[in-house]
Amino acid sequence: MKTVQELNAIRERMKDVVGLRVGETGKAQYKYNVMVCGGTGCTSSGSMKIIDKLKDEIAKNGLQNDVQVTMTGCFGLCALGPIVIVYPEGSFYSRIELKDVERIVKEHLVGGSPVKELLYHETVSEDGVKSLNDTPFYKKQHRNALRNCGRICPENIDEYLAFDGYLALEKVLTEYKPEDVIKLMIDSGLRGRGGGGFPTGLKWKFAAANAADQKYVCCNADEGDPGAFMDRSVLEGDPHVVLEAMAIAGYAIGATEGYIYVRAEYPIAVERLNVAIAQARAYGLLGKNIFGSGFDFDVHLKLGAGAFVCGEETALMTSIEGHRGEPRPRPPFPALKGLWEKPTILNNVETFANVPQIILNGAEWFANMGTEKSKGTKVFALGGKINNVGLVEVPMGTTLREIIEEIGGGIPHGKKFKAAQTGGPSGGCISAQNLDVPIDYDNLISIGSMMGSGGLIVMDEDTCMVDIAKFFLQFTVDESCGKCTPCRLGTRKLLEMLKKITDGRGEEGDIEKLEELCNYIKTNSLCALGQTAPNPVLSTLKYFRDEYEAHINEKKCPAGVCKNLLHFEIDPAKCKGCTLCARNCPAGAITGAVKQPHVIDQSKCLKCGVCMANCKFGAISKK
């Protein structure tokens, strides 16, 4: 166990170690800090081998005392991995391969000149190398929940301490009463980042008001939305912030135990959480009598099996208890009867990641960011048809246009923006007419979507919106726990109707039947999974009804996606008779003599598109 004085001594010592990363070079212990991303994306691209190679080359050149190599969390630009950043310049190397390491060491770390050809192109200008913070991707971001991701080693508690780690917990336990903490959270306006956006302080207040011999704090790290990886990145890059925030929440409501429910498919996050919990216990920051205050609090991990329904709070708690993850009727709400029927609060990873900074900077600091009803920042996993795939954190109220065109770098290949899906399977599609709507909880609901946990999937003109609705319905059908009939059978019937439409068997009146069934499922399902399952259908019907009508009335998919409604044609005026299409057709559906126009036998055509992909003369089109 460390005393307050010992922790402060560690903070001061570590500031010299991490100083280069924040521009403080005066007493820096090293000449260079080399930060290598150790998040899932970069790890899968070989970043751990890059670290080993860097250390070998640094040793060969006798730079051990001048260069520190640090494994860190996600920098945000996930499609550019493996990522290496060299401080104090902040030189940003992207897509680094093992063969590049020797050159970086010799030219940059020994010679003092960054290797410009290997740098991320947005950081290279005629004037030299510019900071990553000056690039379009970062310029409009405000990293609060992600503040330490990419800046500290997540497996070193001392580095977390250097960036004011556990200061908020110390402040709370030595200066605040539990009710003061709750008031601070209420005044900040922090709302839950995991779905519906319920006020965090209010949830804590309800649990604090219920007397019990035992209370619990739960963290939902069971991130299940397709394309979402916000919480995973926080756990991989800054696990101690969640532990600190949970302890603060425990003090506020009178709980002594916490559970982090994390999916087993996140092995790196699980490993780093285990390391962080062990370190926090060793330092006396979890366990008995924290900071000599008499407050006890400890955290346990519970691995989930990947059931999407366990993102719902009562299903999650049922799973922690060792039962099949199924939702329970509410009321009673978890603040009264939650885990093991004791008062319990549940917040997700991103919500907790905001708590220590609110304690340190004050409620007004947080409330000054965002919009009137949606304070602070929001982390989005930006994916789909977008140039800058990755993780972004922006103030609430930022428009979709700013995120897509400025931060995201626009749509690849000059394609037109068509829609963006927010909120995962529970959310809806935002059309181009809403590009300039400020993104916050209430605005998204008003246009037929929702914030959800923060997945943001961008779609271009080549996307079929009926097919997108079918994709999310398929996910919901697979993930339904089956406890209530409206969700179990209703979503399956919805999916059957969508398949019928995309197969070219749609009939007049199907759209009205879809809407009727959607509204029934929303009204009668037991939990939020079923209640929100129809949202992708309803939002696409609202903004892209003409596509449904084209599928049904014209037996045509305007985007050219639904195979049963497609046929490929060869333009005889453009066909040169090169035979390339015929030679590559897996079904032998194309015939024709050399140097003569070819034809496609529609009865044999598999509609795979291989012919179109191989045609060098643009003679084949799909209709």
Image (cartoon, rainbow, N blue to C red):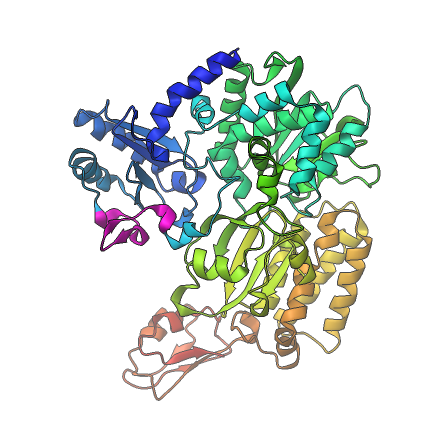
**Does residue 431 belong to the magenta stretch?**
no
The residue depicted at 36 percent of the width and 81 percent of the height is 619
- Name the image quarter holding residue 90: top left
The residue depicted at 80 percent of the width and 51 percent of the height is 485
The residue depicted at 65 percent of the width and 77 percent of the height is 549
Q: Which residues are magenta?
A: 116-134
Residue 9 horizontal/vertical position (percent): 43, 15
Q: Residue furthest right?
A: 331
In the displayed structure, would residue 168 be above or below residue 514? above
**Does residue 132 belong to the magenta stretch?**
yes
Q: Nearer the viewer, residue 400 or 476?
A: 400
In the picture, measured across the screen, residue 232 lies left or right of residue 609, that is right
Residue 538 horizontal/vertical position (percent): 69, 64
In the displayed structure, would residue 569 be above or below residue 338? below
In the picture, measured across the screen, residue 70 lies left or right of residue 539, that is left
Q: Nearer the viewer, residue 472 or 112?
A: 112
